[in-house]
Amino acid sequence: MTVRVLIADDQQLLRAGFRLILERQPDLEIVAEATNGIETVNLVRQLRPDVVLMDIRMPELDGIQATRLILADQATAHTRIVILTTFDLDEYVYEALRAGASGFLLKDLPPEQLAAAVLTVGHGDTLLAPTVTRRLIEHFTESARLPGPNPIVSDLTPRELEVLRLLATGMSNAEIAVALFIAETTVKTHIARLLTKLRLRDRVQAVVFAYQNGIAAADR
């Protein structure tokens, strides 16, 4: 299935570079380019791309604000947002996660990794740049931890809770399968079910939820 992509960045040279990289991938189609946050939101509403490569620092409306607007609209909430930035700063990562972004990447990553990342997100998975560590997510979600246990957690089975704890450490489906001695397809089923029960959009939100609700401990 072809993944339709919108590139949002205020720098023309970077947009051209991203387009050149992504157009080499036969499963990716560039549907538009945007130069600021407002234009991005309007184009997403008009074209309904699968993935938006979203710069953080843009004029008129920054990438995080644009992400919130896109995902708050039921008509465009299915769109996956990959935040691209040159700034490996903690507050940007956390705000992007809270806004609902499905990925966070630095602009200095190798070209082949960019295409792979867009395909990964376009096919429904989530990702974070290797430099965006578990320690970073823990630091911010600890500060936003809820005052008491969330009753919705009781809806999870013991196995689903176990999968969620491992998911929060950054493990892939294959790694979780090895750790629990189950099939990778079974892991996918558990993740799909726990996301539905917790009313979460994707794996990234599941990681944030796990730390906010004390399911994943900071010293693990």
Image (cartoon, rainbow, N blue to C red):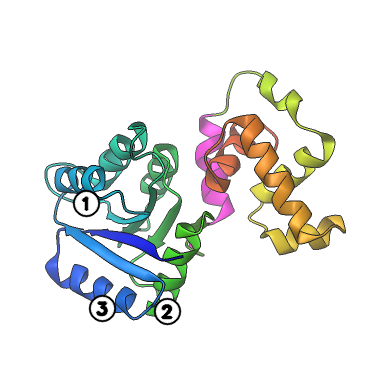
Q: Secondary structure at mark 2?
A: helix
Query: Mark 2 is on which residue type?
Result: Glu
In the image, what residue occupies the spot 42% across and 56% down? Answer: 104
N-terminal of the pair, mark 1 or mark 3, is 3
Q: Residues within 10 Å of mark 3 (few under 14, many from 20)?
A: few
Q: Is residue 49 magenta?
A: no
Residue 188 spot, x, y in % from top left: 70, 52
Q: Nearer the viewer, mark 1 or mark 2?
A: 2
Closer to the chain start, of discs 2 and 3, is 3
Q: Which residue is mark 2?
A: 112
Frontmost of labels 2 and 3 is: 3
Task: From this view, report whether residue 152 is shown above or below residue 114.
Answer: above
Q: CA distance from mark 1 to mark 2?
A: 24 Å
- Amino acid under disc 1: Arg
Residue 179: tell me if it is visible.
yes
- Give the number of the disc on residue 20: 3
Identify the residue shown where x is 32% and y is 53%.
49
Q: Using the numbered discs, state the Cα–Cα distance from disc 1 to disc 3 in whole angstroms.
A: 22 Å
Residue at numbered disc 1: 57
Q: Say which element carries label 3.
A: helix
Numbered disc 1: secondary structure: loop
Determine the main secondary structure of the stretch shown in magenta: helix
